Image (cartoon, rainbow, N blue to C red):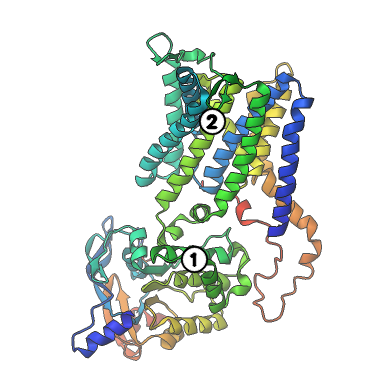
Amino acid sequence: MSPRGRTVASVIGFVVSVAAIFVLPHWLELFTLINATIYVSMAIMTLSLALIWGYGGILCFGQAAFFGLGGYTYAVCAINFGDSTWAVVLAMVVPALFAALLGYFVFWGRIGDVYLGVITLTMTLIFFKLFNATAGDAYKIGSAALGGFNGIPSTPPLNLPWDVGTALAPEDIWYIAAGLLVLFYFGSRWLLSTSFGRVVISIRENERRTELLGYDIRRYKLGIFTIGGAMAGMAGILFANCVFVSPTMFSLFYNAQVIIWVTVGGIGTLLGPIFGSIALQMIVAELGTIDGLDPNLILGAILILFVLLVPKGVLPSLRVLWERFRKPPAVVEASPPTGRPAAGAQKATPSQQPAADAGGRS
Amino acid sequence: MNASVAALETAKGTAPQPIIETRGLVMRFGGVEVLRGIDFSIVPGELRCLVGPNGAGKSTFFKCLTGQYEPSGGEIRFKNESIGGRPSVDIARRGIGIKTQVPSLYDGLTAREHIWLAVKRRIATTGGLRREVAPAVEQVLESMDIAHLADRIVGQLAHGQRQMVELSMVTAAQPDLILLDEPAAGMTHDEVERLAALVLRLRGTCSLIVVEHDMQFIRMIARMVTVLHQGQVLMEDDVETVLRDRRVRDVYLGKREV
Ligand SMILES: Nc1ncnc2c1ncn2[C@@H]1O[C@H](COP(=O)(O)OP(=O)(O)O)[C@@H](O)[C@H]1O
Ligand SMILES: [Mg+2]
């Protein structure tokens, strides 16, 4: 797509999504709206992985760790402060700091991609065990009991900043969650268009080359990893507002889910994983109501199907199709223009946008 | 600038300070000694060709110079500072650029983005302004004659075009020392000539070490040639002397047409 086409598409997309955000609460029942809010919070978590895996080339198997940390930090702080304002800030800062610390050891220690996956996965398992073991009065942070397996059912809802009296209704949470998703999406696009983002993408494409140009790749990886951690933390806050925090937030299931959503939606895109996650959540929820069908099984089957049939993911494949559809005569008129090197001019359609390249390493 | 410093020193009668120098450089992989004590130096502004049969250790030598390998022994000095074993980033920032033997590009990015990455880094290192970047990128695209490729995805370019993009990227960073590992490989005759013209244009603005097999090409660009054989310097002299040398023909050129 031309830059102008992209801008037009962005504006249309923005208007449509804002319209949808305001219309949905009038259409949906409260229960469905809360579910939709959960989907959206999951989409934010998916976006965070799409960013660090699809663009940073960092395959993190433990995105749920940041998600869960965000949720727990929020719940514990909100209970203790009695006001959600700083709880929200801290619930993004804590996962971000944790990501920064972990990233520091991983990237400065030059630990390979595979090990990074193993380490991040192990880390969520540790959190899972750890929070599961916090049953009983001994495990209290301030006045917040961590509650072991049961989590913290009394997770307080958000209130308006510094205004404890105004606990927000589920409808308000919906507006916030959906608004944040839109904000994070455009924020991510902006980030990727900055100098920082362009260097991050180059690292995914060819780490060694970027290093030999004189970029300290560790800093860039750490940067994008930390941003992803903060974003997943925000997803955790929203999730905690719809449900409540419990150790399942750190579970293998949540880890696997986001990876599947990103894969199906398309690695190296942002919209693909966002819509992929929402669509798959809806499909799995729908099919899950059928007796005898296990949602996990459905999700697994969907993943296998996609990896085999649409390995690039939905969005990149759609783009390729679109390019083919739009410019059928391009192949015919590909006789090389005079004065230009003939080779390479044959394919007149660069079907991949740079950003759409499925370049997540490993 | 370096060239003029060198000239000044020559005028004073002292030998010019080498821009890069290795002393007894050794590189071992397990028990295999690939570089066996290499003494090598070039003066600022010099263009040196490095030749030798496959497996002589040329690429390994370059990898040691750019911090991709940590030498097992010996010393590497660049601009009179020891850089052996330092990280690649650090060496790149000190001013060594390399075009590796295996093409190393960003297959999903456009040619313009390649140049941008190099220019951006240079301007950041030299403390330049952000708004200088974009015009500098366009200027490189023009001067390297790849403006028509600017918006093409590099993964879809022909081999020779990719070589040019990579070369443009390396030179756009304006390093003080450029290492080119078989830059003409796989290029058409026309492309090789353009490459030679480019290399000659670079000479004087920076120092270069070029690994090449193509004798035609070497004759076009170089005066001094260093011959590497089994990890050691076999000889070092001007092109014609080297090409006439019997030992060189035996180890290397004998197997090829000259
Ligand atoms: N990482 C490595 N591990 C083991 N052996 C290597 C490694 N890199 C290069 N070699 C060996 O070192 C020798 C020199 O290789 P190289 O520097 O690539 O030669 P050239 O570039 O002169 O053709 C070859 O025999 C090669 O097999
Ligand atoms: Mg080689």
Instruction: Tell which of A146 and A85 is nearer to you.
Output: A85
Q: CA distance from mark 1 to mark 2?
A: 37 Å
Q: Is residue A208 visible?
A: yes
Question: x, y (%) of residue A73?
Answer: 46, 25
For mark 1, give the secondary structure: loop
Tag on residue B103?
1
Q: Is residue B11 above or below residue A262?
A: below
Q: Quadrant of the C terminus of chain B?
A: bottom left
Residue positioned 47% across, 67% down in the render: B119
Q: Is residue A127 above or below residue A99?
A: above
Q: How many marks?
A: 2
Question: x, y (%) of residue A130?
Answer: 41, 20
Residue positioned 76% across, 24% down in the render: A28
For disc 2, the marked residue is A255
Q: Is residue B258 visible?
A: no
Ligand 2 under 8 Å from disc 1 Cβ: no
Residue A124 lies left or right of residue B33; in this view the side is right
Ligand 1 under 8 Å from disc 2 Cβ: no
Q: Nearer the viewer, mark 1 or mark 2?
A: 2
For mark 2, give the secondary structure: helix
